[in-house]
Image: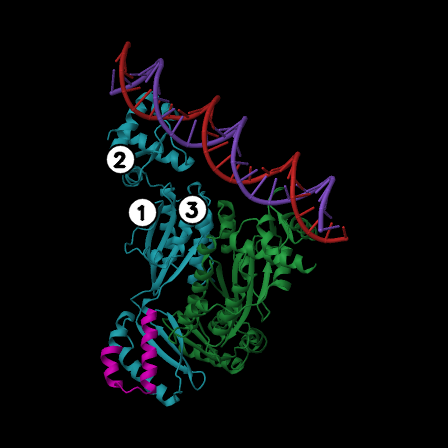
Chain colours: A green, B cyan, C purple, D red
Amino acid sequence: MNNRQTELLKLIVEEYIKTAKPIGSKSLEEKLNCSSATIRNEMSYLEELGYLEKTHTSSGRIPSELGYRYYVDNIMIPKELNGDDMLKLQTIFKNQSLVLSDAIEKSLEIVSELTNYTLIALGSKSLENCLSKVEVIPITETNLVAIIVTDKGYVENRSFTIEDGISPLEVKQTVDLINKHVIGTPLDEVSAKLEFEVKPIIGDNVNHQKKLFDAFCNFINDVTNESNVKMKGRANILKQPEFSDADKIKKIISKFEDKDFISNIKEEDNGVKVYIGSETEFDNDVTIIKTKYNVNGEEGTLAIVGPKRMEYNRAMMLLEYLKENIENL
Amino acid sequence: MNNRQTELLKLIVEEYIKTAKPIGSKSLEEKLNCSSATIRNEMSYLEELGYLEKTHTSSGRIPSELGYRYYVDNIMIPKELNGDDMLKLQTIFKNQSLVLSDAIEKSLEIVSELTNYTLIALGSKSLENCLSKVEVIPITETNLVAIIVTDKGYVENRSFTIEDGISPLEVKQTVDLINKHVIGTPLDEVSAKLEFEVKPIIGDNVNHQKKLFDAFCNFINDVTNESNVKMKGRANILKQPEFSDADKIKKIISKFEDKDFISNIKEEDNGVKVYIGSETEFDNDVTIIKTKYNVNGEEGTLAIVGPKRMEYNRAMMLLEYLKENIENL
DNA sequence: ATAGGCAGTCAAAGATAAAGAGTGCTAAAG
DNA sequence: CTTTAGCACTCTTTATCTTTGACTGCCTAT
């Protein structure tokens, strides 16, 4: 691919990102200093290579998935985040009084508003969390609340019912036993320790202690597995012209509702990564830009979902900025 | 309104609920044992009264908002919940191992699947909750976690940063002071007690104690105000034929994203109430059926959002059943 | 009060036509 | 070998028109 071809692909991608309309050869004559016929020749070459597509036989060209890929990997010149965008986000991150989850939520909202894409954060307890405190508080004869605290300050609670009641003494004995074995243990190893170290001591007799212990094990399991999803701007992405058709809208809204699809968005890489169309394994019509974040005891994924015709540079910079600021909270 | 007119309105509402197509006079000849001309006369009378509408000059009739209202209030004969519907929901409510919030979530999903309407639950701490325990756990020099437990077993936590650190002794003093004044106080009165009983003791000197106290006050305020929203089946309601147009879909999806609109759905009445079109103050194209629920320390609203052309009886029964089962958890 | 009959209205669907944007290909020029 | 001009062709978009069918409203007769 020579210079002019690269330049042509760049122009087409960027113009299409702006206008969402197929680009014809004539409109590029001046920018490339050659005739439309020459451009047509080059276009048909780029189409042969798979970087461009037509929407019908006599239409202008639009970038193919491969075209976007090539643009992002080889052509796009990273530019700093725009000052306005940064300013809008700073109103959130400078506000000290916000709790982490609120700060994430609000910043997702702002980025969605700014870009008209949908923002997603998938968070879960980081496995670096070590259990630092277990408490079980009786509420009534048969109802109890268990609370665990980790060394990163993560707190979870769960209420239990022990049908035929349990005495405060029995509760204390069970909790002491649990504490003795699992304090300081990383969250993801607690289940195994409970199973192999504590369970043998408690034995198989189904008594109050055993019931409480089992309930607690379930609780720990749920905590280590559960993740929370924040999604902002479902309605914003619908403003994009590619989603002006009722069926496409329904398709995308259904996907947003599907937990399996959403949890699949999880990203393991620390950098900002771009997934285009079929690469997303979510929907061929969208691009998803993702990054991993990690902040006191919580780690997760931040993602921007937009049309393939996305402002790649801006979205990547916004996500990068989001990640950095969240990690500094 | 005579018998035949009532019967006519009933037939039109029920047929329209089934088919979503305007009802013509000819299709009702047999059911009413009279000619289409007679039915046309009756129809135009019902239109004059405001119970029916036309979509264009020569179309069949559809029920107006007032028509639905009259149908729900005066014509509809309440029928028991269908056995199949009941069975599907029992799979959730018989499963003892589900936590309240999961049970609500799953049952909303099921009802949405069953009806193709959107289900919403707005929950918040019940004001019957009295504070029964306050704890503050130091995590690092500058980081703390506060935990409150109510007599109903409700637990909330929040982490704080005290920039220049705070000693365990100072923490204990502050927590003891708070405990002394607010244990046993209903959640909604805690803020006032802190302000008028505890604050004067702590005084205005900006020291560590004061900082911790202020952070705790914010925490309590947030707890009493915050509510959580569960929404299931946004995509399902879009299967209804009234939402086959892109603009209408966008409108309704935007509304679902708007927290103010959603929190407005709150219902104070214990019974099952029906709000049609403009009565919803949410969107003129939908009907919302609501009820209030109340279960250990949590109270809230359950709502079904569907088209005005809703299966009123079924939706009402489903909601009633949902409420009862949730309250018995 | 009811019904028959007819004229009139409107939506939906299909057919047709014209305009406009853009391509592919060929042949000539540089 | 590369570039360009030119022309035929294709396809979308938009508008206009027509036909069909489902209704209603109203007048009149029973």
Alpha carbon separation for disc pair 1 and 3: 26 Å
Give the residues in magenta.
B194-223
Nearest the viewer among B169 and A244 is A244
Disc 1, SS: strand
Q: Quadrant of residue B63?
A: top left
Single out the mark in the foreground, 1 or 2.
2
Residue A320 at x, y percent in the picture: 53, 70
- Are discs 1 and 3 both within one chain? yes
Nearest the viewer among A327 and A82 is A82
Residue that badge 2 annotates: B50
Residue that badge 3 annotates: B247
**Chain to which mark 2 belongs:** B
**Chain to which mark 1 belongs:** B
Q: Quadrant of residue B182?
A: bottom left
Q: Is residue A43 magenta?
A: no
Residue B194 at x, y percent in the picture: 27, 78
